[in-house]
């Protein structure tokens, strides 16, 4: 018997019906992983935020909103996502332009768009809109893409990236570029071209260096030699390393991390929250968290593998890889192997917009999974 | 055709896609391994290093200053005490309105602008949660007035601290010394860990010599501290160890008697227990009020003290250089006997002056008419200068120097007081080195009666007298008898040498001759100190001395009354008693006191009398 996902199956008996979660277009394994992350997040946030319940309540509200967004998006079938990708992309670019214009007027960094009752960052939309657009564009024709199409895809990525970099928000710009690049990677960009691009970027490094803002250069300098200015720009990373290192194997115990509790660790509930986990729960805690992330990513890769059409494959692949890049860049910066860029630890760091974007991404992944006719037909879900 | 192509495409695409998923998986795994490696490096390999850094971050050490040891006299009388004083302190953060609080306190306690200004300056250097003193040394009245109004002043409190107090004041100023605020220069030579939280240290006297022992060991409180430096709570405490109490051999009652005996004269009295070298009295007059130095003395007062004509800050007993005058004669006599230059029965004629062979110069005797025919005993009893001119001439300066050196002349006694000087015992080598001149024979004669280059400190002379009283046993004078912790543990004294058991080798007959002659000084009818021998139930062996302050020219005569006070001779008296079993050896110096016999000897007798009465016959 063939199942049609558009149908409701209420006329079937209990054994024959797909499970409830499936009918709600949600995936139990992903939900479980994300829920587990949320629990860890509350645990650490309570400690990092000076044991304030207010912080937890606000985070919980955000989580509920983001979860709602995720569930809503999961209901949209991939083919609709595909159809509206260009419109979404164009809308995002327009909003980014609006931000830049307003930033010009307001003199200085501007990331927010204030619509009176609603304040949001259009750059967060770009994290989803860009891979959607590139996937839509590349999926139109057989893969691997031609040179011309590659160049076009590059343009589609660069446009929002540069606009965000101009805000300036280097961290988000890099993530947007990474999301777009991941689509191109899954589309089968040849290794030779990738090597060549890496070489070209290497050659362009000096030029990029001169186009960076002073504080951005400082961050990179600090990353290369944090001890050079231990009380100034290197302070974050040094205190972060102290927090992690002093945690040892099993940590100082929950609520006993002196670095965070006594305010030595800056940004302890946002970008540097991983250091709090490392201090209080040690290597054991770090590996556990990493394991949860990897389990989620494994499930995502399964979705990518089983995706039925090119658009779904490319988009889900990109979202999965971007999620990992988030994790890697944040942890990498906190443990001092990457420069400090403003990337939060996915679903753990305190903060609103990035959580909505992330869960929206998981909504798309769930949609791709649960609208999969072959899997439903095979009953393997 | 098209369909076929699409099918082929799909197949290719799927393979390509699978490859990319595998590549992505490999990327994810490798990156994760990279993160894990780094985490292991930080949390396992570097754990100890970072744990230390973390601890240094949040643990601040607050010193717990030790209580300074007390200084007591031989009878347990406290000479240096720790008295509580109270100061008014403010924790700015806890006040509701700092400027209003200051204004009200100013009115209530009559604070000066100076007090408020100093407070404001201190406030700039401290954090808001630290307690900053507004006024130190609150009077009882101010305390009472503030205490009544305490509820009106949140964040303001009275803090008690122990401050050094010297109950005997001037009387012990030169012995006990005083403590003062540690200055920058001193700070560099101190162990910074031990002196965290200590603001005072010994500046002079016993306070200085025994600084290490008196100070005690600083304790520590480990405070958990946040990034702003605010203490959260204590995590560990190492209590402070109080400094050792120092029990001196000094007898404060005897010290007072000696001090008062000097009357209006500047000078010094030193008394020691001959058998042990324990110092019983070490008085230098004038003294000063030491308590002023503890809390910080103002410049004007200090300058006044320093420039005062009678130099009250100067410890005459251990730093004053004076010619010993005739007090050197018993030692010279022993030298003559021991080295065979004279014998006890040999008589010389004293015409009132002495001439070196082939020289015109008259070396005068203090008695112009002369003493007639005298033996050694007569020469000491009557203090005949001519006899000792001849004796010195026979001995020569080198033999004199070598013999007298055994009594400790010309070198520091090694007493446990800082700032001692060594006096001068001249020799040819000394003169060549210090004056770049050859020695003249006439200088030997002058040295023989304790004038010229010879210079002693009262303490040095007291040690020599003690050795004489011991019939040769050498002792080191010292003040600290024992060092004791507040729970009664004894500490070894690093500043006093153990008994060296050295003896000056001389025949007992010679010692007896000299001691008998000194007994005659007091007890015979011709003795220069016969004035003090009334009602004596024991024997005092003594010797008077008169130290010339200025030289009388050949054609002049010295007349006490004609010379102004400042140029009058210093009066000396040295003695020990009882003569057969001496329990006290004493030196009295009264600057510009004139004759030793009439002025200094009665002072010495007062002290001897009281000490012997106190300690029982």
Image (cartoon, coloured by chain):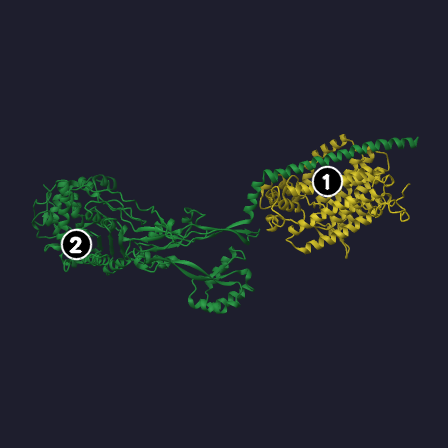
User: What hue does chain B carry in this figure?
Assistant: green
Q: Residue at x 78, y 47 (%)?
A: A360
Q: Residue furthest right?
A: B1
Q: Between residue A229 and residue B438, name the one nearer to us.
A: A229
Q: Position of residue B185 (x, y in %)?
A: 41, 48
Please tell me how crowded label 2 is: few (under 14), some (14-19), or many (20+) other residues with Cα within 10 Å: many
Q: Residue at x 43, y 46 (%)?
A: B191
Dots 2, 1 in contact, CB < 8 A:
no
Q: Is residue B154 depicted above or below B590 in this figure?
A: below
Q: Between residue B63 and residue A85, name the one nearer to us.
A: B63
Q: Which residue is mark 2?
A: B540
Q: Position of residue B471 (x, y in %)?
A: 18, 46
Numbered label attached to residue B362: none
To which chain does the residue with label 2 belong? Answer: B
Residue B280 falls left or right of residue A8: left
Q: Residue at x 36, y 51 (%)?
A: B484
Callout 2: helix, strand or loop?
loop
Q: Splitting the image into 4 quarters, where does residue B601 fall?
A: bottom left
Numbered label attached to residue A294: 1
Quarter the N terminus of chain B occupies: top right
Please tell me how crowded label 1 is: few (under 14), some (14-19), or many (20+) other residues with Cα within 10 Å: some
Q: Position of residue B40 (x, y in %)?
A: 63, 38
Is circle 2 on the same chain as circle 1? no
Residue A369 falls left or right of residue A355: right
Q: Between residue A220 and residue B208, name the one nearer to us.
A: B208
User: What hue does chain A carry in this figure?
Assistant: yellow
Q: Position of residue A38 (x, y in %)?
A: 72, 48
To which chain does the residue with label 1 belong? Answer: A
Callout 1: helix, strand or loop?
helix
């Amino acid at each position: 018997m063939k199942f049609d996902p558009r149908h409701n199956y209420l006329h079937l008996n209990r054994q024959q019906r797909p499970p409830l979660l499936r009918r709600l277009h949600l995936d139990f394994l992903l939900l479980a992983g994300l829920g587990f992350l949320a629990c860890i997040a509350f645990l650490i946030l309570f400690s990092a935020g000076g044991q304030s319940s207010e912080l937890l309540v606000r985070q919980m509200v955000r989580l509920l909103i983001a979860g709602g967004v995720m569930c809503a998006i999961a209901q949209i079938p991939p083919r609709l996502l595909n159809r509206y990708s260009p419109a979404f992309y164009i809308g995002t670019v327009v909003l980014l332009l609006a931000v830049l214009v307003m930033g010009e007027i307001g003199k200085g960094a501007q990331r927010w768009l204030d619509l009176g009752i609603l304040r949001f960052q259009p750059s967060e939309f770009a994290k989803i809109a860009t891979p959607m657009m590139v996937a839509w564009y590349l999926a139109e024709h057989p893969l691997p893409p031609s040179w011309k199409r590659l160049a076009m895809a590059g343009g589609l990525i660069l446009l929002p990236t540069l606009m965000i970099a101009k805000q300036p928000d280097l961290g988000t710009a890099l993530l947007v570029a990474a999301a777009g690049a991941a689509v191109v990677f899954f589309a089968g960009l040849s290794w030779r071209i990738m090597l060549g691009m890496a070489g070209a970027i290497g050659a362009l490094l000096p030029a990029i260096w001169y186009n960076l803002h002073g504080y951005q250069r400082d961050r990179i300098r600090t990353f290369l030699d944090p001890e050079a200015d231990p009380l100034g720009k290197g302070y974050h990373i040094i205190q972060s390393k102290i927090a992690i290192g002093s945690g040892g194997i099993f940590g100082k115990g929950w609520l006993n991390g002196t670095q965070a509790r006594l305010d030595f660790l800056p940004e302890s509930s946002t970008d540097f929250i991983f250091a709090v986990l490392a201090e209080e729960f040690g290597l054991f805690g770090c590996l556990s968290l990493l394991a949860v992330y990897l389990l989620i990513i494994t499930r995502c890769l399964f979705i990518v593998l089983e995706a039925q059409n090119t658009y779904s494959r490319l988009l889900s692949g990109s979202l999965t890889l971007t999620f990992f890049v988030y994790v890697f860049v944040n942890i990498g910066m906190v443990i001092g192997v990457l420069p400090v860029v403003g990337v939060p630890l996915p679903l753990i760091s305190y903060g609103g917009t990035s959580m909505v974007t992330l869960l929206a991404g998981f909504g798309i992944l769930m949609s791709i999974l649960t609208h999969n006719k072959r899997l439903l037909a095979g009953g393997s879900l | 055709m098209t369909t076929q192509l699409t099918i082929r495409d799909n197949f290719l695409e799927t393979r390509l896609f699978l490859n990319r998923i595998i590549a992505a998986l490999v990327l994810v795994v490798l990156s994760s391994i990279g993160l894990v490696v780094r985490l292991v490096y930080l949390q396992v390999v570097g754990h100890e290093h970072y744990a230390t850094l973390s601890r240094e971050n949040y643990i601040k050490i607050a010193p717990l200053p030790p209580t300074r040891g007390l200084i007591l006299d031989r009878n347990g009388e406290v000479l240096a005490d720790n008295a509580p004083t109270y100061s008014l302190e403010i924790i700015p953060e806890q006040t509701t309105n700092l400027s209003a609080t200051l204004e009200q306190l100013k009115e209530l306690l009559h604070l000066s602008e100076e007090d408020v200004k100093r407070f404001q300056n201190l406030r700039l250097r401290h954090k808001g949660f630290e307690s900053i003193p507004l006024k130190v040394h609150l009077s009882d009245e101010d305390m009472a007035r503030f205490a009544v109004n305490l509820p009106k002043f949140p964040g303001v409190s009275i803090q008690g601290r122990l401050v050094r107090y010297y109950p005997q004041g001037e009387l012990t100023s030169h012995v006990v010394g005083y403590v003062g605020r540690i200055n920058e220069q001193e700070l560099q030579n101190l162990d910074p860990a031990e002196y965290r939280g200590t603001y005072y240290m010994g500046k002079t006297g016993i306070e200085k010599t025994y600084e290490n022992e008196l100070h005690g060991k600083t304790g520590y409180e480990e405070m958990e501290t946040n990034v702003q430096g605010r203490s959260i709570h204590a995590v560990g405490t190492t209590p402070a160890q109080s400094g050792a109490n120092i029990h001196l051999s000094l007898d404060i009652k005897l010290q007072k008697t000696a001090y008062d005996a000097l009357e209006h004269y500047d000078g010094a009295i030193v008394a020691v227990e001959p058998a042990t070298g324990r110092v019983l009295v070490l008085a230098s007059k004038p003294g000063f009020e030491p308590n002023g130095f503890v809390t910080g003395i103002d410049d004007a007062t200090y300058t006044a003290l320093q420039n005062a004509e009678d130099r009250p800050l100067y410890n005459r007993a251990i730093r004053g250089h004076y010619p010993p005058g005739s007090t050197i004669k018993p030692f010279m006599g022993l030298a003559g006997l021991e080295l065979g230059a004279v014998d006890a029965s040999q008589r010389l004629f004293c015409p009132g002056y002495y001439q070196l062979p082939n020289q015109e110069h008259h070396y005068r005797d203090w008695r112009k008419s002369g003493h007639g025919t005298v033996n050694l005993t007569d020469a000491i009893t009557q203090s005949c200068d001519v006899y000792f001119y001849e004796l010195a001439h026979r001995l020569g300066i080198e033999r004199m120097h070598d013999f007298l050196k055994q009594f400790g002349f010309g070198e520091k006694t090694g007493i446990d007081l800082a700032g001692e000087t060594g006096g001068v015992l001249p020799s040819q080598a000394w003169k060549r080195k210090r004056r770049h001149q050859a020695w003249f024979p006439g200088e030997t004669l002058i040295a023989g009666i304790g004038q010229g280059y010879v210079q002693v400190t009262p303490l040095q002379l007291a040690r020599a007298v003690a050795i004489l009283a011991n019939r040769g046993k050498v002792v080191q004078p010292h003040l600290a008898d024992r060092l004791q912790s507040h729970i009664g543990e004894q500490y070894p004294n690093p500043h006093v040498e153990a008994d060296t058991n050295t003896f000056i080798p001389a025949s007992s007959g010679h010692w007896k001759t000299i001691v008998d002659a000194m007994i005659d000084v007091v007890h015979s009818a011709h003795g220069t100190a016969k004035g003090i021998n009334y009602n004596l139930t024991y024997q005092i062996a003594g010797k008077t001395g008169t130290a010339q302050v200025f030289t009388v020219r050949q054609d002049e005569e010295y007349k006490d009354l004609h010379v102004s006070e400042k140029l009058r001779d210093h009066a000396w008296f040295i003695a020990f008693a009882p003569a057969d079993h001496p329990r006290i050896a004493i030196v009295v110096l009264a600057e510009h006191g004139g004759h030793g016999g009439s002025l200094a000897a009665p002072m010495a007798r007062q002290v001897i009398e009281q000490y012997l009465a106190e300690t029982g016959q």
